[in-house]
Image (tube, helix red, strand yellow):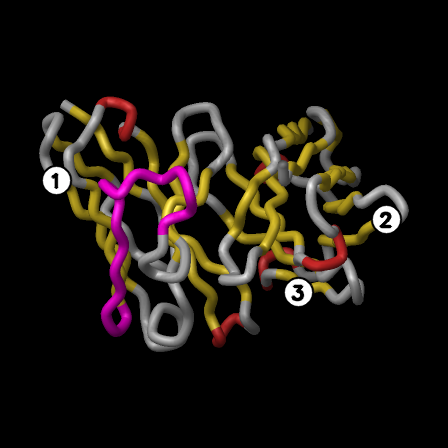
Amino acid sequence: QVQLVQSGAEVKKAGASVKVSCKASGYTFLSYDIKWVRQATGQGLEWMGWMNPNSGKTVYAQNFQGRLALTRNLSTNTAYMELSRLKSDDTAVYYCARKDGFWSADPWGQGTLVTVSS
Amino acid sequence: SVLTQPPSLSGAPGQRVTISCTGSSSNIGTFDVHWYQQVAGAAPKLLIYGNNNRPSGVPDRFSGSKSGTSASLAITGLQADDEADYYCQSYDRSLSGSGVFGGGTKVTVL
């Protein structure tokens, strides 16, 4: 079945960077964009951006321009989200999701908690 | 949030609840709307795609619609395990095609 499995929880200091992985299985990785969304504790969903694994093209939300890098490794069918210059309000659960033919997100990874301490 | 949803709604078992999602011509007026269900402690799950389509496995008690710059999600025959947060999502051409979410609606089954 189609599945996205994310890397484990991270604890980082303010100012550092974090890199979260999202390993895809059960479908042709090159054929679907991967989106990234985050959710602070008790808050709603926030769009971060997406990447086309075939071309490597990325689209980033304005809030993350200059701090966010979405990449991929085609040999392992893995997408990566790297966020730099971390601040305490970057503490959140980060999700990857596959962008399907209707541009909706399905399925989602299980989420990765990133905690930023000062 | 770019898309506006009511923060909370409630209903008794068996009742119908409708969640609204209001946007503008640059988002809902241009792009499809999708809906996600998120139960406590879990990742969001796709509930409705392309305004009014249900993925396989989603009960027909859930239905979506869109008109102009607004959309809505209806849940009929409310059940205890429908208690969750619901989010609408679209895209916005004024934000270079970035995705946008509603703030989410907490549905409580009384």
> In the image, is residue A114 above or below residue B99?
above
The image quadrant where one finds the C terminus of chain B is top left
Quarter of the image for residue B84 reads: top left
Q: Relative to the observer, which residue lies in front, A20 or A116?
A: A20
The percent coordinates of residue B25 (x first, y second) are: 34, 77
Instruction: Identify the mark nearer the N-term, 3 or 2.
Output: 3
Residue B36: give x, y in percent of width and height: 40, 44
Q: Which residue is mark 3?
A: A59
Is residue A34 covered in magenta? no
Instruction: Determine whether the residue tagged by mark 2 lies in a helix, strand or loop.
Output: strand
Provide the chain ID for the residue under circle 3: A
Are the residues under badges 3 and 2 in a single subunit? yes
Question: Which amino acid, mark 3?
Answer: Val
What subunit carries mark 2? Answer: A
**For the magenta stretch, what is the residue range?**
B54-69
Which residue is denoted by mark 1 in the rendering? Answer: B16
Mainly helix, strand or loop, the magenta region? loop
Q: Is residue A82 visible?
A: no
Q: Chain of mark 1?
A: B
Q: Which residue is mark 2?
A: A73
* Residue B68, x across and y down, in percent: 25, 74
Residue at position x 76%, y 57% from top?
A30
Q: Amino acid at mark 1?
A: Arg
Total numbered labels: 3
Helix, strand or loop at mark 1: loop
Q: Is residue A51 left or right of residue B25?
A: right
Label 2 CA crowd tier, 10 Å (few <14, some 14–19, many 20+) = few
Residue B47 visible here:
yes
